[in-house]
Image (cartoon, grey):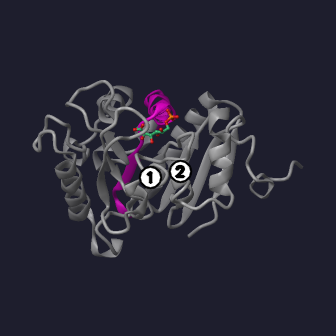
Amino acid sequence: MTRPQVVVHSSPELLAAAAAARLVTRLVDAQTARGSASVVLTGGGTGIAVLEQLRELPARDAVDWSRVDVYWGDERFLPAGDPERNETQARAALLDHLPVDPERVHVMEPSDGRFGDDPEAAAADYAEVLARAARPEDHGPVPTFDVCMLGVGGEGHVASVFPSSPAVYETERTVVAVRNCPKPPPTRVSLTLPAIRHATEVWLLTTGDAKAAAVSMALGEAGEVQLPAAGARGQLRTLWMLDRAAAAKVPGVFVPPLV
Ligand SMILES: O=C(O)[C@H](O)[C@@H](O)[C@H](O)[C@H](O)COP(=O)(O)O
């Protein structure tokens, strides 16, 4: 696993704009290399802010959106169209404004979907979606996502994988149902850390002084059980994009010398 890189931006707005620009470049490079690209979206304020910035970015049209596979790192298990669903927010922020191929927008089932109010069945179904999308060169039941974007919780959760939760101990399944989630709403569907680690690049995006301790611990000695963000690593790159407040306690070894 790669050593994490840290990039610090002067404000949350600039972080979101810079991440949007970085995402365009990453997707264009992937499409140039192999004709398609894949991205895992995240919920949360920072993740959605990136999508809103991307919507307004003229360079967004450099991506052939009809050849992008869109996945989610987690989803709030609510009825379709519920404003709290990550899908609802991502469609409003970006996807409804792009010529995406609906067949390549891979949604986690809602609580009034094909499986009704059964998050375990919805999780198993999404694991099947990932397994069907995987190719032999992915060496596992998950596609090698070009980039997996993640927000970070104040106690170090990523997606809906929370400290010391059953999900963080999962080593076999790629997608699990999460109940009694500390962050409302309580029931969710989430990728597990082994699935997240299939990504070529994992980007952790967070802002605000409430996250500074979790960021510091994740980049320090904390283990993934107590600090799931510490286990969110990409195969080729792990990038932390922070604003100054969230970076306030980053270990000095990660901060470039001021020249
Ligand atoms: O569904 C969710 O809530 C997200 O996937 C979750 O993992 C989020 O990214 C973090 O809680 C950070 O959220 P903020 O960016 O709003 O702090």
Is 50 located above or below residue 108 in the figure? above
21 or 191, nearer to the observer: 191
Q: How many marks?
A: 2
- Magenta-drawn stretch contains 259: no
* Amino acid on which disc 2 is placed: Trp
Quadrant of the rendered structure where residue 175 is? bottom left
Q: Is residue 111 visible?
A: yes
61 or 255, nearer to the observer: 255
Marks 1 and 2, how far apart in space?
A: 6 Å
Label 1 CB, ligand 1: below 8 Å?
Answer: no
Q: How far from the left and from the top, in percent, is residue 135?
A: 27, 70
Task: Tell me where the magenta segment starts and ends, as one range.
Answer: 34-59
Is 248 located above or below residue 164 in the figure? above
Q: How far from the left and from the top, in percent, is residue 113?
A: 13, 38
Quadrant of the rendered structure where residue 118 is? top left
Is 77 located above or below residue 130 in the figure? above
Helix, strand or loop for disc 1? strand
Whether residues under marks 1 and 2 lie with C-beta atoms below 8 angstroms apart, the answer is: yes
Label 2 CB, ligand 1: below 8 Å?
Answer: no
Q: Is residue 82 left or right of residue 161?
A: left
Q: Which residue is mark 1?
A: 148
Helix, strand or loop for disc 2? strand
- Magenta-drawn stretch contains 37: yes
* Amino acid on which disc 1 is placed: Cys
Q: Which comes before the other along the chain, label 1 or label 2?
A: 1
**Which residue lies at the image location 50% right of the left edge and 47% below the top edge?**
157
Q: Which residue is mark 2?
A: 203
**Which residue lies at the image location 24% right of the left edge and 64% below the top edge?**
131
